[in-house]
Image (cartoon, grey):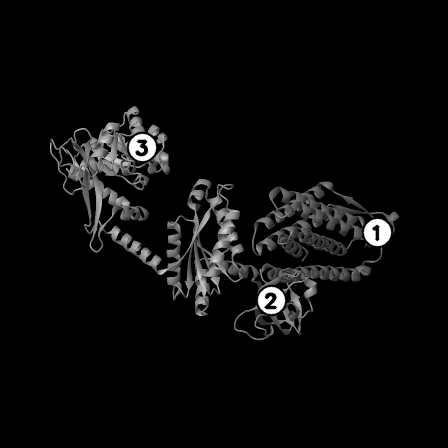
Amino acid sequence: MGAVALFLLLKRSTDCVESRRRQWIAIAALAAGVGVWATHFIAMLAYRGAVPLRFDPGRTALSVLFAILFFWLAFLVAGRSFRALQSLAAGLLAASGVAAMHFAGMAAIVGPVAVRYDWNTVIIAFATVALAFASSFFLFGRLDDWRRIALPASLAVFGVVALHFTAVSATTLVPDPVRGFAASPGDSGWLLIGIVAATMALIGLVLAGAILDRLFTDMRGLTEATLEGLAIVGRGGIVEANSQLAALLGVDRLDLLGSDPACWFKTVDGAALDVERPEACEALVQRRCGAELIVEIAVHAIEYRGRRCRVLAIRDLTARKEAERHIKHLAVHDALTGLPNRVGLATALADIEAAGESFALFALDLDRFKAVNDLFGHAAGDAILCRVAAILKDAVRDGDIVARIGGDEFLIVQRNVEDVTASERLAQRIHAGFALEMDISRDPMAVGASIGVAMFPADASDVETLRHNADVALYRAKERGRGIACFFDLDMDRIVRERRALEHDLRHAIKRGQLSLVFQPLVATDGGAIVGYEALLRWLHPERGQVAPETFVPIAEDIGAIVPIGEWVLREACIAAAHWPDHINIAVNVSAIQFQLPNLASMVGEILAETGIRPERLELEVTESVMLRDRDAVLDTLYRLKALGVRIVMDDFGTGYSSLSNLQAFSFDKIKIDRSFVSHVADDASARSIIRAIVGLGRSLDLPVVAEGVETEAQRLMVLEEGCPQAQGFLFGMPEQVPLVGPSLRIVGGRG
């Protein structure tokens, strides 16, 4: 019984945390020591010798203490793992305890005898019990299921019995009358019964305590293992609760016992907790620290301690509800500025429209934002957007809505607006706020705002149309110079619709065969010989007729249609030039937008190869505006074009962003003086001086200079006198679809 109790308790100790393990190994030492001592003492009481014996109570009690102490030390040494060396050390300590108990018990004999030992046999007995206990501990650490108890217990029993009877066989009782006489053997009968009963009761209680402790501990562990708070409610109060519930409520677990659950939980639906529900209900918890929680409570009926009770399973939903609120907020708000987003604004506008409320819709676009974002980075751009959001929120009234619908686009809903006066004041407040917070003279990251305003229901009968009209007004504000506010009107809408129609038709103009080329001659001012032609684009619209290039080319650049159109123009011009004499060149204008394409040079090379004209016959005319954006990339493209043999001409020199550094950075093949100077050369001395300066500059750089816009003979003579070797204009011929070409074609005067 003692051996089985020993290993059952050891097994229990290995399943516990360290603090409880130490308690259980102490109890195991008690069971083992008492079991071994009882075995020894009962066996000694069974001895019937020639003389009567009895036992000294003090020494007998001391012997059991020896056994308990040494077993306790053995279990401490063995630890949790019971490895080989630890098991051997524990076996030696356990054997020492059994031996100490045995010989202390023998020393407790009181009678007319002297005890003598055969120590060789005793040593053999000690080695036997040490080996038996070491083996039992080692097997205990390696085996599973019932064998983990049965085999080690059997070895322990064998070791104890082997030591006892081997040591007894090595003992000789020598009569010694001097020692006195003991009581008669019959006097120890009651002692035998008492020892057996006490020992069995002790071991039984220890085992029962271990089983009950495991049961209750495991039940408590099961309730503590759950992430939910648990409370068992009976007779109107909480009779049991786990620590998770106490932590959730911010109180001690004992404070919950006996309290009414209604003191802690208030159901959202207002019904009592004991009302039967098909699903869990939500409840609010007011913690003592003041923080309010949202929990989910599931109620189940159980039998607890022989009574019908209810168990409340409480799950904290606060974090989940907060996450849901956050997700719902992000669904209708901009994550960067916290303003309503497109979805949130649409919902608000639908509600306002349904209520029949009059309001003004402001569409705002930030001026210079893209440049600032590219120059200073996206982090700086985000900071600017937050500053803009603050400016707009300060400018509006309570109840008005400021929304960010994407990028640098903002919308403002000014509610309860009866006329445009209030909207004009709001636009003024917005611009005043930008002037105060975004002073470009002090802040290089400052931006402005262009504003378009449309009124509901004056300008539109539905929100979609109103939004379109506000965008139309915004477009007009940008056209007029940015940084201003424009209010929608019907004429504005007509212009925008016409532009949208032009954009649509222009995208399909090539496929529909509506584009064509005309060619204007380029002549030598001295003699009038034709040296080349410039290809000019024309668009014959089926409904509008001829659309002026100054009308549709900027649109093509805005919408990106200039890229396929430019490629088409270059190919058609080269195809036409392939049929001309080799000394007649072809000039083609290239847009700054086309220079943003990394494959421009390769595209030109492919067209030259397809059409078969020599590269030096092709002149590509560019304006200095191409240098304004990504100068290094543009110069790289120019050098690759130059490497093909193509001639590069600077067009419209003297206007726009003229810079001598551009002439220094790249060796152009020709300079063309803008027609605005040539047209005033006869009546404006400064215009003639500018032409003279440009010609002188070209001569010093060894660059031929072409005068554009020559329309009279007087102008031709003047540019000839100033030294322009080539000229172009109506004087020499109008642009024609089929140019006049020939080996000796000359233009003497008037149209050629």
**Secondary element at image label 2:** strand
The residue labelled by disc 2 is 284
The residue labelled by disc 3 is 685
Q: Quadrant of residue 630?
A: top left
Identify the mark nearer the N-term, 3 or 2.
2
Q: Residue type at mark 2?
A: Leu
The residue labelled by disc 1 is 111
Q: Residue at x 30, y 29 (%)?
A: 692
**Secondary element at image label 3:** helix
Question: Nearer the viewer's eye, disc 3 or disc 2?
Answer: 3
How far separated are the C-alphas under marks 1 and 3?
Answer: 152 Å
How far separated are the C-alphas under marks 1 and 2?
Answer: 80 Å
- The location of residue 156, given as percent across then percent down, is 65, 51
Identify the mark nearer the N-term, 1 or 2.
1
Count the marks: 3
Residue 158 vertical placement versus 673 (above, below)? below
